[in-house]
Image (tube, rainbow, N blue to C red):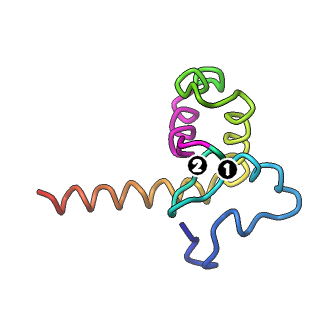
Amino acid sequence: MTLPETGKSILEMEGVGRHMTSDYVEQRDGAYFVRGSRVSLDSIIIGFRNGESAETIRDNFATLTLEQVYGAITFYLSHQSEMDAYLEAGLVAFEEARQGQQ
């Protein structure tokens, strides 16, 4: 997903000070995933927003390491406004698709 104001993805806009966090997140097919896994960043963020600890999130996604979970949370916190907008856009698209099927 690209940001409308820049035409670039969050990962393309990474600055030197934020390089480490992108080691844990990758963009594929317009969505964000924990690097090297099929776990969406959305899933990690939702758990984190719901108050789940990193350990609980890791337990929910047995293929992830605790380091990957913390890396994904760090990425989210470093890009919170952009990621919140990304999640909101996904919810709007889902709702529009759902309404179109009724």
Q: Residue at x 59, y 42 (%)?
A: 37
Residue 6 placement (x, y as % from top left): 64, 78
Residue 5 placement (x, y as % from top left): 60, 78
Figure quadrant of the N terminus = bottom right
State the residue position of label 1: 25
Residue 38 is inside the magenta segment: yes
> Residues at badges 2 and 1 in contact (C-beta under 8 Å)?
yes
Mark 1 nearby-residue class (10 Å; few <14, some 14–19, many ≥20)? many
Q: Nearer the viewer, residue 66 or 90?
A: 66
Kind of residue at badge 1: Val
SS under mark 2: strand
Residue 92 occupies which quadrant of the picture? bottom left
Any mark on residue 33, and which? 2
Q: Residue at x 51, y 63 (%)?
A: 30
19 vs 28, left or right, is right
Q: CA distance from mark 2 to mark 1?
A: 6 Å
- Residue stretch rendered in magenta on the structure: 37-51
Residue 42 placement (x, y as % from top left): 52, 45
Kind of residue at badge 2: Phe
Figure quadrant of the C terminus = bottom left
SS under mark 1: strand
Residue 41 is inside the magenta segment: yes
Q: Residue at x 70, y 36 (%)?
A: 68
60 vs 21, left or right, is left
